[in-house]
Amino acid sequence: MSPEPHRLQKELLANLAGEDAAPQPAREPETVAHPRKRNPKAIATSAVFLVTSAALLASSAAVLAFDLPMGFAIAGAGLAAVSLGQALLAGRRAERRPARPAHKFHSTRKASKSEAASERKLDRSWEAQETPGQVGAMFDALGDIFVAIGPDSGILSCNEVFRKATKVEQPIGKSLIETGIVPIETDTGREVRIGEGDSQRIWAWRQTASRDANGKLVTYAIGREVTNERLAREELAEAKTRAEDASTAKTRFLATVSHEIRTPLNGILGMTHLLSQTETTAEQAGYLKTVRESGHSLLQLIEDLLDSTSIEAGRFHLRENDCHPRELVQTTCELMAASAHEKGIEIASHIAFDVPETMTSDAGRLKQILFNLIGNAIKFTEEGGIQVEVDRDGDRLLFSVSDTGPGLKPEDQKRIFGEFERADNSSTRKHGGAGLGLTISARIVQALGGTISVSSVLGEGSRFSFTIPIKPAGQSSATHPDLAGKPLEGKTVLLLAPVGPVADTLIRSIRELGGHAERASAPETVRAAMARFGDDVTDLLIDRRIADENADFVTATARQLSNDVAKTLLIAPEDSRELKLSPELAAGRWLVRPVRAVSLVNVLGRRDDRDERNRASGVITTPTLLRPSDTPTFDILLAEDNPVNAFLVRTMLARLGHRVTLVENGLDLVDAALERPDGKCNFDLVITDLSMPELDGESAIREIRSIESAESLERLPIIVLSANGQAETRDAILAAGADGHAEKPIDPEWLTKLVSVTAANGRKAREA
């Protein structure tokens, strides 16, 4: 204890005893007293400092190590340290108080008790005055508010930061509200806002209550300024809200634009199809083909934009079912072949024979990836060709698309999968495109659980590869039965074809299937092959391109072979209409490139698979909507408000022999569909547009299904036509009670099949 308290203590004791404050003679104790070696006041004060400092240091470290809320929460431990320090003071006084000697005189004991009581009062008074000031000074150094509040809500003490923040010079005795402090609850805890407008400051607020050395309940509070952090957080939250609103608006905008573009595009492509069914000149047919291809290019751009938006919004979903990878790859290559052949380049596919015939995946999304990769390869390749391969790598499938295009620079390879990225972004670029195809493909591959990559050499070409896991299917996942074993064992094939993917794939496939094969494109290479084969040649495969360029060479080669050697012509899909070959060639069979492995086995194995090959080369014939004689006709209710689309669909259905009744809004649709004389349906089928005046298609379907259920009426099959190709729309339509869905622009063949199957199933259900 400092000298000043000692002096006051002695004066007070003297007054209480009625004696002078002069020193008293020492008394002989009965027991040896334990002398006071240290000042109890100093010990107690040191305890306060130690405990409080430790808590504040811990809080400061936490503020540096963690974000502000957590650090500030720990800093609140300083409040607890105040009360803890006071408790330690009391404990120290009891512990350190000297043992008073026993005395035989009662007056001496009374004086000793008085002295002890006086000392305790002085200690408590000293602590009450000194401790808050010391703690407040510590918080001043930290830049934090510190305030002690009594049980009557009046301020007992505060630090300088509090006075400056509140601009209240004499806060003692006032309440927090009177000083402008009103703590409020937020999602991050309590906080206090002091000031208005731009000058407003924000303080994170923590308070705790404990009893002081005199037993009074005191509330201690600290505040840490978090103005910049809170404003930044609020700005971030506001920016996030704006971004989400903008994304939602963009999605709605693109969906609306997509619908508005699809509707006239449906009319363009539909009318083009109908016109192609009429008699046209070769020149007119060429013009129609250009219009149709341009329309499909525009449609693909719309699909990419919608997919990109769905991915951004987190609404991208897979539809995994039984998938046939071999059939999928072959069909995709056949569809893309016409575009490749128009540029004078090749396209070929090779699927390893250990690739499962059936697996679980999203076939539509896989086809989309392949369309993007093959389409890009065709777009950028001017000579040579494209090779599509599928191999098995353990429990994964590896797809690759290789081209002989210009290749990519190393820096372009790193960014090529980015959104709206193109290898050439200059205004003078040769090839167009929005730069979305590869981005969407990468996102789909990722969703399928795979990876995608590119390797390229500038000036030599590129190879895009992706992997997906092999998931067991509900059906057998064995390889194709016609490819099992060595079906071409004993076959020796001489291939007359130019160098390129087609020849390489054929040679590779024949060898893997157990046969022998060599390629030749000139007399010297033919002689070399014949020298190796001798009289063992069983088949001659002749590429139409070689035959057209050098018919004499092909004829001479054929004459060198035995009459028993089977001759097969290798043609492009567009070549089958008109073949101009020397009669001496006498090729009795043909294969369409890109060649399917099964077709190759069937032709070389002398199996008749002409129907299958005709199907594979279906692009050489123009589809027709003329109804087969055995196809039933139906009464159809068509709801369509767009005159062009109404005319198009009605014409397609009428050419099939169906009877069509047209309504132009949703309310008329409901009335006509529910008109049931004798409880029977007037129609076999309803076809309705999704967007309809008065009542939209989905709402109309729900109302029809509701009334059918309530009144136990026959269920009328319903097909919906929609210009919105998003999966969510299709799911909502089917959930409302639709039986089928067709996207605009309408695929005539798909609509034909959908109408026949849906109407026939509905008729059977009603007759049952």
Image: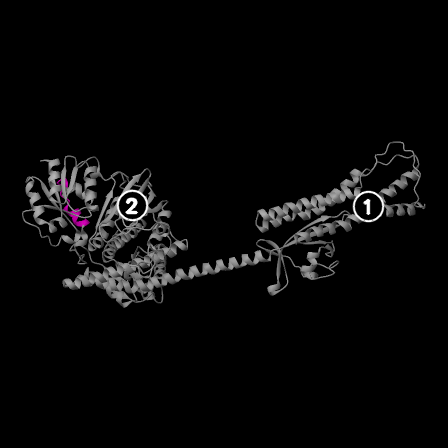
* Residue furthest right in the image: 19
Tell me the amino acid under the disc marked 2.
Answer: Ser
- Residue 156 horizontal/vertical position (percent): 74, 55
- Residue in the picture at 79% in, 44% down: 41
Report the front residue among 692 and 3.
Answer: 3
* Residue furthest top in the image: 31
**Residue wearing tag 1:** 2
| Secondary structure predominantly adopted by residues drawn in magenta | helix
Report the front residue among 707 and 523.
Answer: 523
**Which mark sits nearer the N-terminus, 1 or 2?**
1
Report the front residue among 231 and 423.
Answer: 423
Evaluate whether residue 660 shows in this view. Answer: no
The CA span between labels 1 and 2 is 89 Å
Residue 58 falls in image quadrant = top right
**Which range of residues does the magenta coloring cover?**
604-616
Dots 1, 2 in contact, CB < 8 A = no
Q: Is residue 607 magenta?
A: yes
**Residue wearing tag 2:** 400
